[in-house]
Image (cartoon, rainbow, N blue to C red):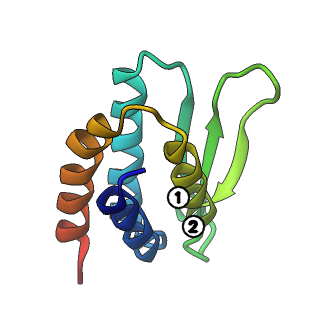
Amino acid sequence: MLDKCKNLFLEMRDFSDNLLAMRDFIELLEEWIRWNKGDAKVALINLDDLGFKDEQMFVAYDDMSGSMNATIYGTLDFIELMIETLEEYDDEEYLNDFWVPRLQELIKNNEY
C-alpha cells in the first residue's frame, strides 16, 4: 500500500471511537466495494442506537467469500483489517486516487 495511503489509515485509527468519522468511513468503504463490483457487506453498529449507554461501536463485515458469515469487529480492529486487506490490493494508483483524498477530507472534517 502506498505510504501516504497507509499513513492516513493509521491516522484513521485515532478516529475509531468517533461516531461521525466511523459512519463516514463505512460509507467510503461501501463506495469502494461498489466501485470494485464487490458484494461484501459492511455495517456500523452503534450500541447507543440500541439502547445501551456505553457508546461502543462495532463493525459487522462479511466479505461474501462463502467461508463464514458476518464477523463483528471493534472499530479499531476493523480499520486494522482494512489496512491488511488493502496492502494486498494491486491497484496502488486507485488507492491513491480514491482513498487518499477521501481519508484526508474525513480526517479534516472530524478533528476536534
Q: Residue at x 53, y 19 (%)?
A: 39
User: How far from the left and from the top, in percent, is residue 19?
Assistant: 41, 65
Q: Along the horizontal axis of the image, is 39 left or right of 94?
A: right
Element marked by disc 2 = helix
Q: Residues within 10 Å of mark 1 (few under 14, many from 20)?
A: many
Q: Which mark is residue 34?
A: none
Mark 2 highlights which residue? 76
Asked which quadrant contains residue 60, the reply is top right
Amino acid identity at mark 2: Leu
Which percent across, then down, holds residue 82? 53, 50
Amino acid type indicated by mark 1: Ile
In the depicted view, which residue is nearer to us: 43 or 49? Answer: 43
Residue 76 is situated, as x and y percent measured from the top left of the image, at 57, 67
User: Residue sitting at 63 percent across and 62 percent down?
Assistant: 77
Residue 70, located in which quarter of the rendered image? Answer: top right
Q: How many marks?
A: 2
In this picture, is 33 found above or below 102? Answer: above
Inter-mark Cα distance, 2 to 1: 5 Å
Confirm or deny contact between disc 2 and disc 1 (CB under 8 A): yes
| Figure quadrant of the C terminus | bottom left
Q: Is residue 10 above or below residue 35?
A: below
Relative image position of residue 88 (x, y in whole percent):
55, 40
Furthest-bottom residue in this view: 112
Instruction: Tell me: 8 left or right of 68.
Output: left
Give the secondary structure at mark 1.
Answer: helix
User: Residue drawn 59% across and 70% down?
Assistant: 56
- Which residue lies most toward the top here? 37
Q: Residues within 10 Å of mark 2 (few under 14, many from 20)?
A: some
Q: Which residue position is annotated with label 1?
A: 79
Q: Nearer the viewer, residue 65 or 53?
A: 65
